[in-house]
Amino acid sequence: MRRRAIEGTTPPEPFRTIVADCPWPFGDKLPGKSRGAAKNYETMRIVDLERYLQAQGVAVADDAFLFLWRVSAMQAEALRVMDAWGFVQKTELVWVKTTGPVQSTRPDADDGHSLALMPKLTFGMGRYVRASHETCLIGRRGKIKVSNRSQRSVFFAPVREHSQKPEEFFDIIEKLSPGPYLELFSSGHRRPGWTSLGEAHRETTD
């Protein structure tokens, strides 16, 4: 896999928040020039992903959060990687993928926040059901606590390019967890104030 050196200002202290969108070796042999992970970037073996933080010399704080995106068919493998990195899964965050921006229209009686009208969902890939969401596992090490206890377990945001995560996701992470922030295997996203390591390199486009 093509790797990039750490980009951004490397913090003097260990990372307390890590976001990882791993290049899972998902066997999605689909027709077309760009359908499927392996046609968009070089994937990695699970054993190499398990060793990744140590191999790259990433310093992680004793009290830290990991936000690990996984694919539906590789839940066990995602938990293996999380365990190898020294985290224990606590919960998950689900991105409901839409085809356009979400517009809020009325207040929620519980807390005064606005609720959104149901947007049009994406019609994604899938051999059994067509995927309209992605799941991010949330793992913890040590005794760190979330900064915001009102975050819901799902959020709506439009899809972007292949594997690219929405800005809304990073907004949520910054409200939940403290820095320094590290993003692993970015798909072209560069968030101000974050350090980036590794890149899922896009190989082809239609």
Image (spheres, rainbow, N blue to C red):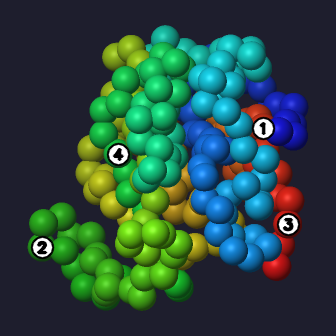
- In front of the other: 19 or 193: 19
- The numbered mark at residue 204 is 3
Residue 202 is situated, as x and y percent measured from the top left of the image, at 82, 58
Gap between marks 3 and 1 measured at Cα: 18 Å
Dividing the image into 4 quarters, which one contains the N terminus? top right
User: Which amino acid, by three-letter code, is at mark 1?
Assistant: Gly
Badge 1 or badge 2: first in the primary sequence: 2
Q: Circle 2 sits in a helix, a strand or a loop, which is it? A: loop
Q: Nearer the viewer, mark 4 or mark 3?
A: 3
Which is more N-terminal, label 3 or label 4? 4
Q: Residue at x 65, y 69 (%)?
A: 30
Nearest to N terminus: mark 4 or mark 1? 4
Residue annotated with mark 2:
109
**Percent of width and height locating residue 59:** 66, 15
Query: Could you tell which of marks 2 and 3 lies nearer the N-terminus?
Result: 2
Q: Is residue 185 left or right of residue 131?
A: right
Looking at the rendered image, the disc whose residue lies closer to the viewer, 1 or 2, is: 1
Pointer 4 and pointer 1: residues touching (CB < 8 Å)?
A: no
Distance of mark 2 from mark 3, alpha carbons? Answer: 47 Å
Which quadrant of the structure image shows residue 161? bottom right
Q: CA distance from mark 4 to mark 3?
A: 31 Å
Residue, x 54% and y 20% (percent of image)? 85
Q: Residue furthest left?
A: 109
Residue 147 visible within the image: yes
189 relative to 5, above or below: below
Residue 173 marker = none
Task: Give the residue number, with chain letter if any, for mark 4.
Answer: 92
Identify the residue position indicated by label 1 in the image. Answer: 198
